[in-house]
């Protein structure tokens, strides 16, 4: 049974890491190079993150500069940024792409909060899915008489406790990011 708990905790921990990286990619008033982490560019047939095909810097608090190593990639990078959900129009001078981040409007902040809440809900769904898998594993163990009926019930309670803990962490992360976005 300890193996089931360990696996449950591991899978739920990975879900939490995915949520953290998703939340890092949501901008909160400042230009952050991590905002571009999820944007993939077709680089010789391979989807590649922007930070692997060029230099991404933030010379000012509300400006990101992308300097691709190959200038022919500028149009591809611009196209992918336009398709993404970051809501910024790229400007290029033939050598670098500049992303100027305007002050967030109240409407845009509310849209970002909706995005954050969606990420939180997706994480909770993934955590509940892991819980279901763990409970199924416990049922199988009971069926083949590896564990008793009492162990099965105790196991389900423990899996639920683990689930509740991770759901609480998701809620805290979402609330923290929401506060960060709304305070600027």
Image: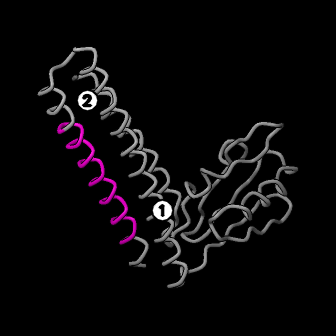
Identity of the residue drawn at 73% across and 41% down: 47
Q: Earlier in the sequence, mark 2 or mark 1?
A: 2
Comparing 108 with 168, the one in front is 168
Rate crowding at label 2 as few (under 14), some (14 to 19) or many (20 or more) other CA atoms within 10 Å.
some
Residue 163 lies in the magenta stretch:
yes
Neighbor class of circle 1 (other Cα within 10 Å; few <14, some 14-19, many 20+) is few
Q: Secondary structure at mark 1?
A: helix
In the image, which disc is placed on residue 96?
none
Give, as a single range, the part of the protein colored magenta.
157-179
Left or right: where does residue 118 sit relative to residue 80?
left
Q: Name the side, left or right, on which 90 lies relative to 164.
A: right
The spot of residue 138 in percent (x, y) is 27, 27
Chief SS of the magenta region: helix
Which residue is painted at 34% across and 58% down in the image?
173
Residue closest to the eye, 23 or 95: 23
Please say which color scheme the image uses: one colour
Residue assigned mark 2: 5
**Residue at far left of view:** 150
Question: In this rendering, is residue 141 above or below 168?
Answer: above
Question: Which of 172 and 129 lies nearest the eye of the viewer?
Answer: 129
- The quarter holding residue 178 reads bottom left
Above or below 62: residue 103: below
Relative to 9, is 116 on the left or the right? right
Q: Residue at x 58, y 68 (%)?
A: 60
**Residue 132 image point, x, y percent:** 35, 38
Say which element carries label 2. helix
Image point 79% across, 44% down: which residue? 42
Residue behind mark 1: 118
Question: Where is 85 relative to 123, above or below?
Answer: below
């Amino acid at each position: 049974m300890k193996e089931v708990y360990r696996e449950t905790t591991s899978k739920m921990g990975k879900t939490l890491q995915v949520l953290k990286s998703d939340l890092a990619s949501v901008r909160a008033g400042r230009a952050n190079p991590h905002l571009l982490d999820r944007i993939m560019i077709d680089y010789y047939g391979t989807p590649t993150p922007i930070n692997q095909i060029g230099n991404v810097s933030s010379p000012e608090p509300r400006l990101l500069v992308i300097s691709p190593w190959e200038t022919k990639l500028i149009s591809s990078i611009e196209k992918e940024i336009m398709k993404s959900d970051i809501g910024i129009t790229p400007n290029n001078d033939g050598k670098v792409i500049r992303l100027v981040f305007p002050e967030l409007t109240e409407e845009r902040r509310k849209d970002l909060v909706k995005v954050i809440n969606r990420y939180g809900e997706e994480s909770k769904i993934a955590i509940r899915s892991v819980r279901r898998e763990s409970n199924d594993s416990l049922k199988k163990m009971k069926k083949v008489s590896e564990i008793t009926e009492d162990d099965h019930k105790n196991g389900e309670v423990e899996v639920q406790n683990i689930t509740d803990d991770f759901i609480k962490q998701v809620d805290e992360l979402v609330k923290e990011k929401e506060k960060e976005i709304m305070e600027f």
